[in-house]
Amino acid sequence: MINVIQGDITTLPVDAIVNAANQVMLGGGGVDGAIHRAAGKELFNACLKVPEVRPGVRCPTGEARITPGFKLPAEFVVHTVGPVYRDGQHGEPEKLANCYRNSLALAAESGCKSVAFPCISTGVYGYPIEDAAKIAVREVREFLSRAETPRRGDAAMEVVFCCFSSGDKAIYEQLLKD
Ligand code: ADP
């Protein structure tokens, strides 16, 4: 099931919220800063413990890492790093698609049944929202359609697109009508 809401992702009582992090994973502006503030210092410490794959890089672009949510209502934070948008001709669509795929796979592996995404890469990283939302909707639909048929009594995964603006929400709602 897919839902779209407008609001602050740090308040959502879901199993996992996804963070639009950066490669070093130690906090930043935008949704990343909001998540770190709401989760508390323990989130920073948990991120510090994520091993670097090379100096200054804990999570390469398109990949995902998981930590507890600490003071958040969400049990987990899935940290993923979206591409910085240049012109769409530098692998940005594939990298953004990987964020959604890898985040969903990691959340599912950890037993999450509800996952909320912000509009990854569409803030400081400059990805045009219409293009980014198309990729997000396509990848989530693809993941949900491929997911194993739930066992009896098991709920299928719920994915929430948590938009910060009403304009972004309208774009997702339009795409989900098609
Ligand atoms: P990026 O660096 O990946 O572009 P940003 O944090 O700059 O990430 O922006 C990603 C999206 O998150 C933007 O649409 C921004 O408006 C939104 N955003 C910022 N704060 C929050 C929040 N507390 N909850 C949900 N979305 C948020």
Image (cartoon, rainbow, N blue to C red):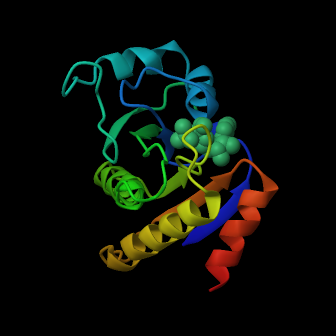
Residue in the image at 36% along x and 24% along y: 24
Q: Quadrant of the C terminus?
A: bottom right
| Residue 103 vertical placement versus 75 (above, below) | below
Answer with the quadrant where ligand 1 appears in the image: top right
Residue 52: give x, y in percent of width and height.
22, 23
Residue 53 lies in quadrant: top left
Judged from this view, the residue extending furthest toward the bottom is 178
Residue 61: give x, y in percent of width and height.
34, 42
Residue 115: give x, y in percent of width and height.
50, 54
Residue in the image at 57% along x and 70% along y: 2
- Pick whichever, 57 or 71, lies toward us: 57
On the question of residue 11 being in view, the answer is no
On the question of residue 125 being in view, the answer is yes
Residue 130: give x, y in percent of width and height.
63, 65
- Pick whichever, 126 or 164, lies toward us: 126
Question: Quick check: 87 left or right of 11?
Answer: left
Residue in the image at 66% along x and 68% along y: 172
